[in-house]
Amino acid sequence: MTCIAAINLKDRVVIASDSQVNAVQGGKTFPANFSKLIEFPNFIIGFSGEAIAWHVLQGYKASASIRKRRFKTSQEVYIFFRKFYLDLYKLIDKGIELTKEANELILITKDKIFLINESLVEECEIMATCGSGADIATGSLARVPDPELAVAEAIKRRSDCGGDIHTKELIR
């Protein structure tokens, strides 16, 4: 499905992802390749799972109030993502099926990393990973603090991770 890795370095926070996503069209699931990193002025979100999460997050880019958000606490992130999950689950009511991986995200700011799933927001001091390649990426980040390398390792070792690697950073 996916691999997202983020690390908090001395002068910046870096996030990387693969680009393999499952998309549903006409009731059929097929792999699609595009960036899983959605960039806002003050934060970047990396999502794990189906392409429908990308569409919900892209819709938020049109909202001036969301674009201006600055996240400082886990509680602020939780309130934001509670809305995201409500919007995502409205799509389920329309017949779109989601898997557990669609509920994992990483949000980075210039100085923080937050790991999010549908019932938990965890502020991660040094690094965070999510998706099916998270275990491999975590081991790689523990050895070498490079999210792009961590995602490359996951792609090499897991058939459900793949595509191009996308990297973004926020400098302090």
Image (cartoon, rainbow, N blue to C red):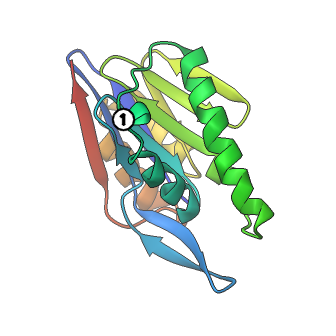
Q: Name the residue under label 1.
A: 67
Point 70% across, 61% down: residue:
91
Residue 99 shows in the view = no
Viewer-side residue, 101 vs 93: 93
Q: Tell me residue 149's x, y (percent).
A: 31, 45
**Quarter where residue 80 is shown:** top right
Q: How many marks?
A: 1
Viewer-side residue, 86 vs 52: 86
**Quarter where residue 24 is shown:** bottom right
Q: Tell me residue 172's x, y (percent).
A: 21, 17
Give the amino acid at mark 1: Arg
Q: Tell me residue 66's x, y (percent).
A: 43, 34
Point 31% across, 63% down: residue:
164
Q: Is residue 121 left or right of residue 14?
A: right
Q: Tell me residue 92's x, y (percent).
A: 75, 61
Point 40% across, 62% down: residue:
19
